[in-house]
Amino acid sequence: MSTTTVSHLDKVKDGPWSGGKSPWNLEYGKIMMWFFLISDAFTFSAFLIYYGAQKFAQPTWIDADKIFQSIPGIADSGQPLVFVGIMTFILIMSSVTMVLAVEAGHRNSKQEVVKWMLWTILGGLCFVGCQAMEWSHLHHQGFWFGRNPATGLTDPDAIAAALQPYFSKEISYTAALQFSNLFFTITGFHGFHVSVGILLNIIVLFMTLNNTFERRGTYLMIEKVGLYWHFVDLVWVFVFTFFYLI
């Protein structure tokens, strides 16, 4: 009677990966989060590439220093990029507090996780609030989806006068309209991501307060939500560069 010999490769195929062992030694949920973030990065990349294509296809474009020179509720002009600089600082600091929350989770320190998650949520709310103020200010100036300050005007001189404060070179109604559409679309899409991140952080905070992670014996969920939050922060760096600096 012959004896069947089972090779080593066949023996290891009974693990959860059906290949023996995870090659990266990563938890399933964390890998799925990375897959989601990569796919979302493609979406943001498409938006920003389209914005760049439209901008450089036009002979002229709105000057960021002229359209973003106000601090809503404080100064209407003369403070170029100050307000968006404050917004960016707030979001970056919220990313720092998220790092501290993840680090506290590695040490199973519930109180510190709660503290840093609260600061992260507060930073996110401040950023979204600042973005809403900026949107309101630009809307008051005449910018919106499908609109710019010259929309509805027919006289060329009136159109030029309405758009002149926002251009350094020649004036283009089409460029102003494209800028308006893309600005509200892309920053709105990012703001939606920040809002989702705030909601996730609030859920995780309540789970922490409810001792959910202590019963599980791990705070890995904090790290997974942190990956999303850092992604949102990184995307803003590119949005900030495209719209406010270039």
Image (tube, rainbow, N blue to C red):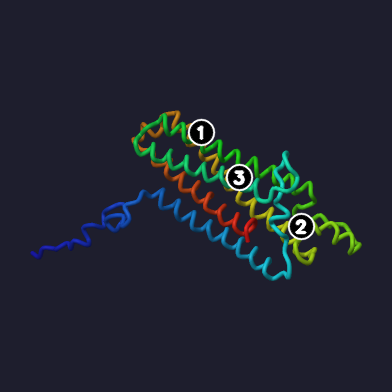
Query: Mark 3 or mark 2: which comes first in sequence?
Result: 3
Mark 1 vs 2: CB contact within 8 A: no
Residue that mark 2 sits on: 166
Q: Nearer the viewer, residue 194 or 62?
A: 62
Residue at figure coordinates x 76%, y 61% from the top left = 167
Kind of residue indicated by mark 3: Met
Q: Determine whether, in the image, residue 178 is placed left or right of residue 218.
A: right
Kind of residue indicated by mark 2: Tyr
Kind of residue indicated by mark 1: Leu
Residue at figure coordinates x 79%, y 56% from the top left = 165
Q: Badge 3 local density, few (<14 within 10 Å), some, or many (20+)?
A: some
Residue 128: numbered disc: none
Q: Residue furthest front?
A: 78
The count of marks equals 3
Please tell me whether mark 2 sits on a helix, a strand or a loop. Answer: helix
Residue 87: numbered disc: 3
Where is 26 relative to 46, above or below?
above
**Residue 71's quadrant in the figure?**
top right
Query: Mark 3 or mark 1: which comes first in sequence?
Result: 3
Please tell me whether mark 1 sits on a helix, a strand or a loop. Answer: helix
The residue mark sitting in front, 1 or 2, is 2
Residue that mark 1 sits on: 118
Residue at figure coordinates x 37%, y 32% from the top left = 109
